[in-house]
Amino acid sequence: MFFAKAGKYQACKLFTSGHFALIIATFACIAIALKKTIHKSKEDVYKIIRNLTIVLVLLEIFKIWFTLQDFKIINVKEWVPLYYCSLLLYAGLLSSFTKGKLKRVGDVFLATGSIVGGLVFILFPTTSLPTYPVFHFISIHSFFFHGVMVYLTLLVNKTHYIELKKKDVLYFASLVGVVCIAALIVNNIFNSNLMFISMDFPNTPITILYKLTGKLFTPMMIIGQMIIPFYAVYIIIELFNKYKEKGKQKNSNC
């Protein structure tokens, strides 16, 4: 069953007992991992990022090979890693194996947008559970991958691996923008919907935006993904830091 072809066994589907079991297991693993690594040094956090990136890239290569056993190579939406969550791979590589501004691009994504993609997928795993059973490589891999997305954002921020600034949105937008351009090119060639920027994605919240924006759908999706995830996390971090600072001042006054 673990490596069975798509359709051979009954799919888990969304919001089933199997889905909820994977959610609980994923968050439990995140909590355990954080407990063991929350007090690590910046050097140790760098090693964690690098090692997880290597593991994820190797798993992605295997997943692509495995997927191509079921689907033709021209069915790019099934195997080409040009989706929002795929950004974790590129951000991890930049963070681990480059320096200067390129490293900053990777670090900023890990500190902000990574958790957004991870949480959304864990709740709505539309590319795995509707097709595969719970105990299948694709299902387990997808929850591990997106669990890592959540874990790394929490780890990077709790250990102060980087200090975020408002202008870091430019680094975030540059990474998302490059991937969106690549996805748009592939979409136009293969009539696909990588990064979900070229057409509707039925039975998801994207449908609402698609109906509201019409011909502006593609630019709106690109701009939205370049900005919204960063600010969603950045604002929460800023509010948390202000609340924490007020608590310190209150205690010092007492």
Image: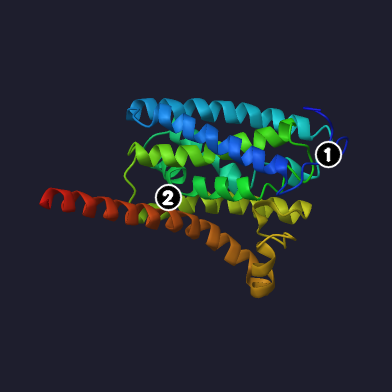
Q: Amino acid at mark 2?
A: Tyr
- Give me the residue at 17% from left, 49% from top: 251
Which residue in the structure is indicated by mark 1? 71
Looking at the image, which is closer to me, 186 or 25? 25
- Give me the residue at 45% from left, 51% from top: 172
Task: Specify the farthest residue to the left.
Answer: 253
Separation of disc 2 and disc 1 at Cα?
A: 35 Å
Q: Amino acid at mark 1?
A: Phe
Residue 245 visible in rendering: yes
- 126 up-or-down from 147: above or below: below
- Give me the residue at 54% from left, 54% from top: 177
- In the rendered structure, are the residues bearing label 2 and label 1 in contact, judged by CB atoms less than 8 Å apart? no
Which residue in the structure is indicated by mark 2? 171
Few, some or many residues within 10 Å of mark 1 (<14, 14–19, 20+): some
> Going from the N terminus, do you reach mark 2 or mark 1 first?
1
Q: Report x, y in % for residue 105.
A: 43, 44
Few, some or many residues within 10 Å of mark 2 (<14, 14–19, 20+): many
Q: Report x, y in % for residue 150.
A: 51, 41
| Residue 48 picture quarter | top left
Looking at the image, which is closer to me, 214 or 138? 138
- 150 up-or-down from 169: above or below: above
> Secondary structure under badge 1?
loop
Residue 97 visible in rendering: no
Q: As drawn, is 172 to the left or to the right of 136? A: left
